[in-house]
Image (cartoon, grey):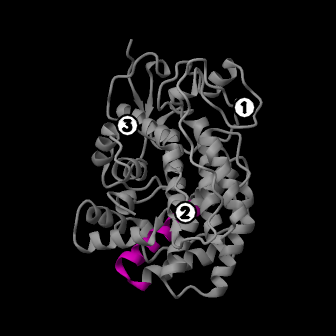
Amino acid sequence: MLRRVRTTAVAVIGAAALAVASIAAPAAGAAPLPTTTAVKAAPATFTHPGVLVGKGQLDFVRSKVNAGAQPWKRAYDQMMAHSLASLSRTPKPRAVVECGSYSNPNNGCTDERQDALAAYTLALAWYITQDSRYARKSIEIMDAWSAVIKDHTNTNAPLQTGWAGSSWPRAAEIIRYTYTGWSAAGVSRFSTMLRDVYLPKVINGSNSNGNWELTMMEAALGISVFLEDRAAYDKAVSKFRGRVPAFIYISADGALPKAPPGSGIDTRAEIVGYWQGQSTFVDGLTQETCRDFVHTGYGLSAISHFAETTRIQGQDLYPEISERLRHALGLQSKYQLGAAVPSSLCKGDLTLGLGPVTEVGFNALGNRMGIAMTNTQKLTEQQRPAGTNVLFVAWETLTHAGNPG
């Protein structure tokens, strides 16, 4: 029996932490698990700029925009017309950002996320245009927050810290390493902010839904690169490598999905409960597919962002996660495009709204690695230019469409 598909707008994640299951061993007769890449330590020398976008990628984007090539020129025009790129923006920092479940209360939550995204947007605008006004405005926003912010509180604090903490180092890397006007004092104070306010909130992860920890690890990794903190970098990579198999199922896992390491829960009932009540597992199903595609998209985006940064840093994790990521992007794209939903999948009832999250993963797997991704390619091209979810995703057609890196 087929049931209708519901669509929802982007919602901010709730804070309720769920129990997690221990890693399930492959069932008898199951295909072997994909070969993983060798565990590598953080780079002895970090690459800068090196969070989500590197110097070569930025040069590629600038050349395409200057040539008026598509889809980059449309994506650039979209970005520059957005309020996040405004030179008249006034930052709204506060000492304590308080974010409850679904950002209720919302005491600085939206302001912080959007100011962090604005700093990144303005940094991109600076690099593409070479107009120093954009660099100075990005610095103004970063300096304003680093002078004030002390803490994040209430139930959504870890996720809020992860969202904003993913955007800040992207902006800071571009400005610090491609513009000479950020003062040493400003850089130092911003570094202290990341080290003392953001990193402690995200580095130890979370036992809540997968998109929480994946976003937190994205933030931890970006911060580690900016701070050149090798210990934090290694810890973020370790947690990421445990969480990705717990977020995306592939048949090589066996009869049951994996779950975050160290939880101690291993019964089928517990695992099914953690996977939103889904008891039939197919390649590319995520731990939050049956919740909704919005939160699933957050997790897939964070996975792509994390792997993109490690690749820039010389530790390419895409080969290790490619089988999971390609299936997950493909499955979600298929139904986002309108395919009929079987009753075996989330009782035939999906809540769509994947968001602008496929560009980075598709470019890495489909373009660079040559993996056929028909549904993902179709959705990605259909949604161009990909805009922003005003949380931690922004302008990825501009930065990653066809970008060889």
Q: Is residue 5 above or below residue 43?
A: above
Q: Is residue 300 above or below residue 385?
A: above
As measured in the structure, the alpha-carbon distance from the residue carrying label 1 to the one carrying label 3 is 28 Å
Pointer 2 residue: 167
Which residue range is magenta in the image?
A: 112-132
As measured in the structure, the alpha-carbon distance from the residue carrying label 3 to the one carrying label 2 is 25 Å
Closest to the observer: 320 or 239? 320
Closest to the observer: 65 or 361? 361
Q: Residue at x 32, y 37 (%)?
A: 375
Q: Amino acid at mark 1?
A: Ala
Q: Earlier in the sequence, mark 3 or mark 2?
A: 2
Pointer 1 residue: 19
> Is residue 118 rendered magenta in the image?
yes
Determine whether label 3 and label 2 are within 8 Å by CB.
no
Pointer 3 residue: 333
Question: Which image quarter is the C terminus in?
Answer: bottom left
Give the dominant element type of the magenta stretch: helix, strand or loop: helix
Q: Earlier in the sequence, mark 2 or mark 1?
A: 1
Q: Amino acid at mark 3?
A: Ser
Determine whether label 1 and label 3 are within 8 Å by CB.
no
Q: Residues within 10 Å of mark 3 (few under 14, many from 20)?
A: many
What percent of the width, then of the height, locates residue 288?
A: 55, 33
Closest to the observer: 156 or 1? 1
> Is residue 256 rendered magenta in the image?
no
Q: Earlier in the sequence, mark 1 or mark 3?
A: 1
Q: Secondary structure at mark 2?
A: helix
Q: Amino acid at mark 2?
A: Ser
Closest to the observer: 208 or 33? 33
